[in-house]
Amino acid sequence: MFAKELLTIALACAIGAFSLGARADSSFNPVSDMFISGMERHDFVLVSNAALRCGSLNLIVGQILERDTNDTEAAAGLTELGGGLSTIGMYTAAAIFKHRGVEIDIENLQQRALDSQDRFTKAYLERMSDNLASDGEMWANDEVIKADLDFCKGLQILFTDEWLETIQSNDWQYWDDLFAE
């Protein structure tokens, strides 16, 4: 039931994100697009990338809040969520190799995850820098970043036993049923 409630919240954020106009770069699509496409297509690559992208964003914002505010609780929460999403993104990437029958090299897998996160981090930081130069706010007026932050909270559904079962078995029936409701 917990996963269903989180998914409902995530989908509500996704629906809102579809109609958003981007400020800094119109080619920067909401992370919800990537995640929902991955779930619909049963594509571990897209789900993994969505988790890694959300991990990057939450880690960035957590570090900025820690540096620039006294809100250490919010900063710690974002950093914890970012770390968890980064880890689940890496484990989901491992499922890709497992289901293709390829031996999993943990060091290679970790490096690939770090490389992906580095790309996502650079993209968000560039966007935030452009926003700062444009209006003095890093993300407060950026509808895509705000939507991504909201949506990423819902990706805690990937911390569930149901997702663990999916990445182990490649059986998406639970998620198909959940999305169909």
Image (spheres, rainbow, N blue to C red):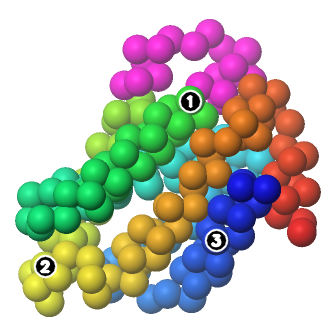
Query: Residue 102: x, y in percent?
Result: 66, 14
N-terminal label among 1 and 2:
1
* Total marks placed: 3
Type of amino acid at the residue the image marks with label 1 = Tyr
**Magenta-drawn segment:** 93-111
Return the residue nearer the eye: 120 or 66: 66
Query: Residue 18: x, y in percent?
Result: 59, 81
The nearer-to-camera label among 3 and 2 is 3
Type of amino acid at the residue the image marks with label 3 = Ile
**Residue hosting label 3:** 9
N-terminal label among 3 and 1:
3
**Residue hosting label 1:** 91
Quadrant position of residue 66: bottom left
Badge 3 marks a residue whose secondary structure is helix
Distance, label 1 to label 2, CA atoms, is: 34 Å
Quadrant position of residue 104: top right
The nearer-to-camera label among 3 and 1 is 3
Distance, label 3 to label 2, CA atoms, is: 29 Å
As for residue 62 lying within the magenta part, the answer is: no
What residue is drawn where x is 41% and y is 24%? 110
Can residue 105 be seen at all in this image of the molecule?
A: yes
N-terminal label among 3 and 2:
3
**Horizontal relation, residue 44 to residue 22: left or right:** right
**Residue hosting label 2:** 132
Q: Which mark is residue 75?
A: none
